Image (cartoon, rainbow, N blue to C red):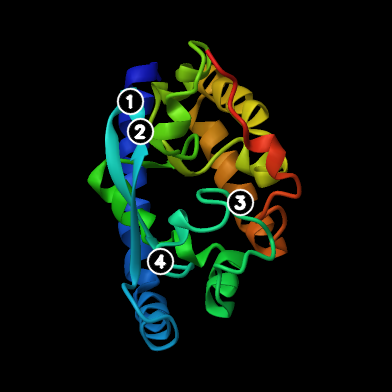
Amino acid sequence: MDRAAARWLKLVFDRVIAALVLLAFLPVFILIAAAIKALMPGPIFFRQVRVGCGGREFRVVKFRTMVIGAEKMGLGLLIEKDDARIPTLGRLLRRWSLDELPQLWNVLKGDMSLVGPRPTVPSQVSEYTERQRRRLECLPGLTGWAQVHGRNELSWPERIEMDIWYIDHWSLWLDLKILARTPGLLLKGENVYASDLGKFEIGKK
C-alpha cells in the first residue's frame, strides 16, 4: 500500500472510530455534563485555540476541569499537580483523561486525528525553531508517540523530538500500536501532571 492510500485509510479510520466511541460514550457524556453543571458553576465545555496541521488554528473542545478564567490566574497555561484552580471533579476527570473525550468531535471535523502530536497553543508554536515546526506536518492527535513514552514527564523539546520521530516513521501499524498502549496508560493515571514545570520551556529561535 502506498503512503497516500494509507493516509486516506487513516482519515476514514479516524472518523469511523470517533463516531462509534461518541455513540458508545453518550451516557458518560451526559453524566459528566450534568456533574459539571451541578458542581462547577459555569460552562460545561472549555474551548481553546490550538495549532494544527500546517499551522492552521482551530478550537479544541474539552470538558471544563478548572475554575472560570483559570488561564489568567496563578501559573497561567501551566498546571501543577496540586493546582488550586482545579476542583475535585476536575481532578477526577483529568485522572482518567475523561476531559479529553469531547475532542472526538474535533476528530470528526477533521481538525485532529486519533493519533498524532498533541495540539498546543499559538504562543508555544511561536517559540518553535525551524526543526520544531516539523511537528505541524501532520494532524494533531488525541494520543501519540510522546504520550505513550512519558507524557507530561517529558520536557517539551523531548516531546517534540518524539513527535518528529513519529512523523518520519509513521505507518498505520504504528498508529495501531500507539492506540493499543494508550488505554493501559490511562488506567494507571501516570504523568497526568509534570513534576518539573521548568521542563515546559520551548527552544527559542
Residue 174: assigned label: none
Q: Amino acid at mark 1?
A: Gly
Q: Which picture quadrant has residue 86?
A: bottom right
Identify the residue under disc 4: 63
Q: CA distance from mark 4 to mark 3?
A: 20 Å
Identify the residue under disc 2: 52
In the picture, measured across the screen, residue 108 lies left or right of residue 143, that is: left
Few, some or many residues within 10 Å of mark 4 (<14, 14–19, 20+):
many
Q: CA distance from mark 2 to mark 3?
A: 21 Å
In the picture, measured across the screen, residue 152 lies left or right of residue 15, that is: right
Q: Secondary structure at mark 4?
A: strand
Tag 3 or tag 4, which sits nearer the N-term?
4
Residue under the point 75% across and 45% down: 196
Identify the residue under disc 1: 55
Q: Amino acid at mark 2?
A: Gly
Tag 4 or tag 1, which sits nearer the N-term?
1
Please tell me which residue lies in front, 24 or 188.
188
Please tell me which residue lies in front, 82 or 75.
75
Q: CA distance from mark 2 to mark 1?
A: 5 Å
Q: Amino acid at mark 3?
A: Thr
Identify the residue under disc 3: 182
Q: Which picture quadrant has residue 154?
A: top right
Residue under the point 50% across and 66% down: 98
